[in-house]
Amino acid sequence: MDLFGKTITELQALIKEKKVAASEVWEYFVKRSKRHNPKLNAYVSLLEKPSNPIVKGIIPKMELWGIPLAVKDNYCTKGVRTTASSKVLDDFISPYESTVTSKLKLSGYELLGKTNMDAWAHGASTETSDYGLTKNPWDLGRYPGGSSGGSAAAVAAYIAPGAIGSDTGGSIRHPSAWCGIIGLKPTYGRVSRYGVIAMGSSFDCPGPMTQSVEDNAMLLQIMAGKDPYDATSSPVAVPDYRSKMKTKRKLKIGIAREYLKGVEPDIQTAFENMVDVIKKMGHSVVDVSLMSPEYSISVYTIAQRAEVSSNLGRYDGIRYANNRAYFGQEAKRRIMLGTYTLSHGYYDAFYKKAQKVRTLIKNNFKKTFEDVDLIIGPNTPVTALKVGEFEKYPFFGELMDQLNEPASAAGIPAMSIPIELDSKNLPIGMQIMGNYFDESSIFNFAYQIEQETNFFDVIKKGREKYK
Amino acid sequence: MSKSVHLTKEDVLHIAQLANLPLSEESIEKYQKDLTETLHYVENLDELDISKTEASSHTTDLQNVFFEDGTKETRKFTQEQATQNAKNIKNGQFVVKRLM
């Protein structure tokens, strides 16, 4: 059977109906990964064998039985090398399992490989990886975006049917937009951070990256929930995302014009076309006013660097890993900025001020969501840049993530979905932001758009080259 | 935060020392420039009135999270597991630099 392009949901059905064996699915994706990874460099490590014992003819009642997924290399996976794409952790074999991958394991998934990323998730290109750049499957001369660039490229080229990423200031949404797939950053605390190599602890959100909205909702369903090992994980009940997704709701959608400033004309046009489609679908669209994303960049820059300096303080080279001389330039830059803003005499001027503005950003979103169900806007100011082009943009990472960082600073959920291609034949992403713990409305809306437009076949076109 | 923030070479070396980061001589100037630039960028926060605003340490308003004392046997590392990734081990223990 030809499995090419099948969603996770479709693969699940085929396995359950015994039309394809779990072992065949594994072989299929291993073969594809081995064939295409040398040019894409989506993986840091590719697994040789499935971890679940596959006995012919027996299909355990586990939701993800036989489904191989790619997981970003900042998730601790027991007995498997976990590097966060940094030479500091070059030979680190995790002695324990993250909560997210534990939950996936309990559901029967197979770990296919650990995906490349910006080292420590610092960046928006995978360029800071100590294991080489990941290439954008749409154009191998371009960045995939980041930091979850390996996960995005793996899904876009269909060398994995789905992937897990993590988003601190856009690290799921940004590469999802540049590679033309669906990526969700859930509400902060919706998914446990336990066992995810810490970057900005008050921002970090694990999330799914997929080819379909239903796959995305299904994976979040498995990943979400309170975890005693992450005190910031939320006790708020997890709804049944898929059943809530399929009732056609008429939603009130807000557009923040502040988010269109400085965005490439092609992206603006695609976005306006999308707004027309949304109106025709019967949703109401209103303008809302949000704080300029420029303030979120500053809040993010200060608070995240401060958290980085504290989190990366644990790498002493004594208990595990290599010593601090192995940190790359970007990590050093961030650690030093955070060390400075947290140091005596500067704390109030930087860190505390940023945390106060963070309150303003939160309140701004809370107030706006009293009036609208969702807020939409472009996901990135430009489409995938050519390798090397980042030098033209000082402050590259933050500029590329500027439309993503407000949701990160506030802790609200946000998704990137593909909308059309630009004149360079590169995918454009639209961001859908929702209220706290209201991933359901995002799924509902994105699913309706998928039914109506099939995302203009962007996802299908992306993987065609890799058939 | 004032517009006068300009990190000197000594500032960079002091920060690097606090963060225990070895820097190469030729990289110091680059960090001096980059860090100063970033500190200038974030000055836009001064445009906002935060005189009556409380600081946010958290985004989802969680309060009082407790954890039961103790831990499960299954979560405990053996000595071997705990030391398996260390570079310098003697008699099953971590070797550290002499402190005194």
Image (cartoon, coloured by chain):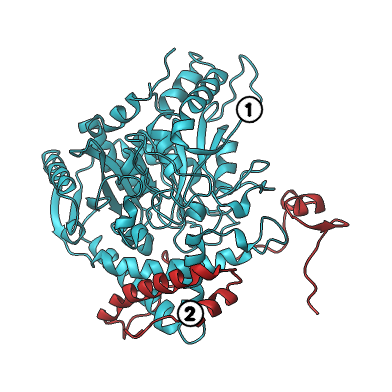
Q: What's under tag 2, amino acid-wise?
A: Lys
The image quarter in which residue A387 lies: top left
Between the residue at mark 2 and the residue at mark 1, the CA separation in whole angstroms equals 52 Å
Q: Farthest residue in the front direction?
A: B26
A86 sits to left or right of A461: right
- Mark in the foreground, 2 or 1: 2
Q: Name the one closer to the observer, A5 or A374.
A: A5
Tell me, what hue is chain A?
cyan
Query: Is A153 located above or below residue A430 in the figure?
Result: above
Would you say residue A435 is visible in this rendering?
A: no
Q: Residue A49 got which mark?
A: 1
Chain on which label 2 sits: B
Q: Give SS at disc 1.
A: loop
A282 sits to left or right of A292: left
A401 sits to left or right of A67: left
Pointers 2 and 1 in contact (CB under 8 A)?
no
